[in-house]
Amino acid sequence: MENASVLESRSRRFAGKGAALADRLATVAIWFSAMLALALVIGVIAAILWQGLGTALSPSFIFGKPEAMREGGGIWPMVVSSFYLAVLTLSLVLPLGVGAALYLSEFARGGRIVRLVRFGADSLSAVPSVVFGVFGMVVFVIYLGLGYSLMAGALTLTLLNLPTVMRSAEEAVRSVPNSYREAALAMGCSRWEMVKKAVLPVAMPGITTGAILSVGRIVGESAAVVYTVGLFVRKVPWSPFRPAAPMAANIWHMYTEGALVPDWFRVASGEAAFLLLIVLVLNLLARTTAGLVRKKMGYRA
Amino acid sequence: MAGTVSAIGKEWLIRKALLVSALVVVFGLALVIFFMAKESLPAFTGAGPANLFGSVWDPRQGRYGMLVFLTGTLTTTAGGLILGTPLALGLALFLTQVAPRRSRSLISRAVELLAGVPSIVLGWLGFTILVPWIRRMSGSSGSGILAASIVLAIMVVPTITAISRDALEAVPPSYTQASLSLGATRWQTVRGVLLPAARPGLLAAIILGAGRAIGETMAVAMVIGPASVFPTSLTSPTHTLTTKILMEMGESTGVQRSSLFAMGLVLLVLTMALVMLVRRVSGGESRLMVAE
Amino acid sequence: MVSTFTGRGGPGGGQGVGERENAVMEQELEVGAEPAVPGIRVEGGYKFRLRNLSLYYGERKILEDIELDIPENRITAVIGPSGCGKSSFLRCLNRMNDLVEGSRVEGGVFLDGEDIYRRDCDVTALRRRVGMVFQKPNPFPKTIYENVAFGPRILGVRDRATLDEVVETSLRRAALWDEVKDKLKEPALALSGGQQQRLCIARVLAVEPEVILFDEPCSALDPIATQRIEDLLVELKEKYTIVIVTHNMQQAARASDYTAFFLIERQGDPGRLVEFGETGNLFTNPRDERTERDITGRFG
């Protein structure tokens, strides 16, 4: 038949070689992307650590008092601020996020509410952090009269982190096998009792992993915090209703105003390195608990 | 009997409480939109839309045009996507098609790590290393759209990679098998079958990456200049919407402050539009056919 | 071992590793050499000759020591209980097993006298010559036209007129043209199961193969669609060598010229070729008692 000659033509033989060449080129390009990405990650982390690790790991820096005019300042109030903020935020966002996740997964009946909630969560998660920041300033700092404070920051960050906490909590809750639910219901539990006894305990490790990752995000958040919590304090903050200075905001402060301090570059580099270390450690911690979750699920499921 | 009644009552209460938790996001979104609109009202009534969307920012002359900053946002986002998308796509293809089993988790974990780097830290790195390097290479100030695009590219790669990877993995393996069994090379299969089939997901990935880039503040703030003028080149300082809001809100009052809120409102509209676009792209696509 | 995009079997190969272990079999096999199974007379030549073929997925042995010759331009059915490795056997013929991570082959598979597992074999060219139709119809999420045109495009055909011609010819040969000629631009996934499967056949035909492998092609189809495909097979064998794996004894008896019977003794054993012969003889007068036991129990 005529077609056989078409497909056997010389141009097809070239096409065969061309295809093989394209295949090889594509392979190279793809390997290149992967190596470039790897190099970027290593490069970024290495550069930050190289610049500031020395400072970051010295106790006098971590636990030292900050200086506004002189050299040799430390960042202890900033470290405390960051973690204080994280704890406050978590205490608000976890119950809300887990509650929302439980509602969506276990109690929701109407499709309309679920769709509305999902739309709200998706939209909220796309809002730029600086918009959250100025919103928080207007509503919490000014309107509610909280002033620049950890509380104002916590409320703002709760809104900012709620979508992600909801998502990870929902994932954890949905991964609980249905057999657990059925068993509890068969024993006569009400819906909530079933959730409390059969779903939550099993989902807890997954929820914990999500919480640890949230701490990382909260500690690294800067734009939303600059206009709600504060940029610089001398003393360790005790009251959540007074200004504080999380590390992420303080680095910004160093960049913009820090030139007053002679070794501002060293302080900022050290703070950045320290912050990165914390985030890396939290990441590692989250991954370990996630691994434990998998093992636990593997046994039971 | 009283016990059961209160038990049912308790159940009802808990259900309502959980519903309220779920609605917080909706309520919060509404609040954000409301307050941004409220705070930007003086700018709309005082300066007017023509002024606000004009190209001159000079508060002393009563000019509050945000066009410079909008341009900055759009160009840095475009730059970040142009640099970051090929890298992310290549990475996603690597992780799904090429990587030997063991390196797969190593590389994907490395990319996750990149996602965890706080933007202020990345901005600091941009300020201390990237900008001086560009300055040396080009003799200009070093900061500007190029620096911001590079930094943004680094920030969006993890997002685009993760979603693209999901999209690629969701393509039924039977398509790949069919293609290979016809004598197609691996790349012909990727190009002819895999990428077209994954297109909705890949588009969603890029759109979400764009959303991330548009909203990024800190990393860009430290490398963008800043200057409230249109850039004359890739390495001349300028501003984006986010960086302008960040750097001026503290000292602004009156109409100026309000115009900053107007910029925030524009950001809000932009990002929400992207969210809706993503839903259209990935939800409404017919599964029957994907165009070439 | 770094697994590259192109694989080790030459340009454009699969992702896994298809190694060949038995160095003795590297020489080419004469087409006219002694048949594997003595006593079988075959007009025409043999398309495939398998010698000492063993297949491993990692540590597990899937097939053991297969010696078989597949006649040209005939329909050869491969039957046996489930799990005996029939599909894996089929995939050895077009090296689709290479895609399974850790797969390994010992022995030789000779297509027209050349070992397809030799080091420098062009796997994409092989797969063009040896096409495959899968158990579940798997048309691409494209138009009917683009499905069939996919193969020629891969081979470098760009000219619209040529593509149109190839598409029409292939659809005609797959007995699908009349049903779809007015809706070539419609999605392939909108077709019925039987039509989709015939579309997949057309897709394979469009690359002008020499052999077509069918892996239980009718198991997902209704009896009418099944009948149409069986009729199609008889038409196709004039130009192509057909190997069809089926779990349906009646289908094998109806539609094939030769039958190969595979078996595993116990769970976890590798599959072995028990008997091969003309279909009529195998079913009425099997030589091996295991064949007899298995077939007469379920046939008739």
Image (cartoon, coloured by chain):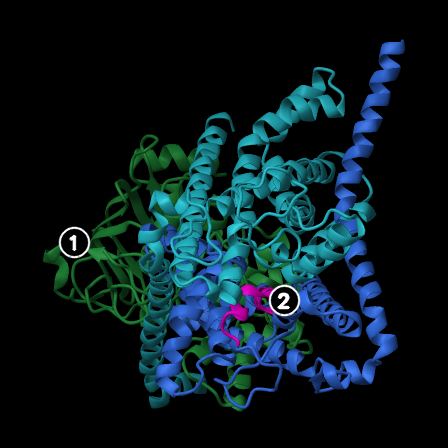
Chain colours: A cyan, B blue, C green
Residue B89 screen position, x and y as percent: 47, 68
Parent chain of label 1? C
Q: Is residue C279 visible?
A: no
Q: In which image quadrant can residue A128 be found? A: bottom right
Q: Nearer the viewer, residue B84 or A86?
A: A86
For residue A79, side relative to residue C71 (left or right): right
Could you tell me the amino acid type at mark 1? Answer: Glu
> Does the stretch in magenta take in B205?
yes
What secondary structure prevails in the magenta region?
A: helix
Q: Is residue A242 visible?
A: yes
- For the residues marked 2 and 1, what is the alpha-carbon distance in whole angstroms? 67 Å
B107 up-or-down from C262: above or below = below
- In the image, the segment drawn in magenta is B204-224
Parent chain of label 2? B
Disc 2 is placed on an element classified as helix
Q: Nearer the viewer, residue C182 or B283?
A: B283
Q: Nearer the viewer, residue A108 or A127?
A: A127
Could you tell me the amino acid type at mark 2? Answer: Leu
For residue B26, side relative to residue A170 (left or right): right
For residue B61, side relative to residue C178 (left or right): right
Residue A88 screen position, x and y as percent: 62, 39
Q: Give the quadrant of the N terminus of chain A.
A: bottom left
According to the picture, the residue beneath numbered tag 2 turns out to be: B246
Q: In which image quadrant can residue A25 be found? A: bottom left
Residue C262 screen position, x and y as percent: 34, 43
* Residue C21: mark in rendering: 1
Residue B185 screen position, x and y as percent: 37, 71
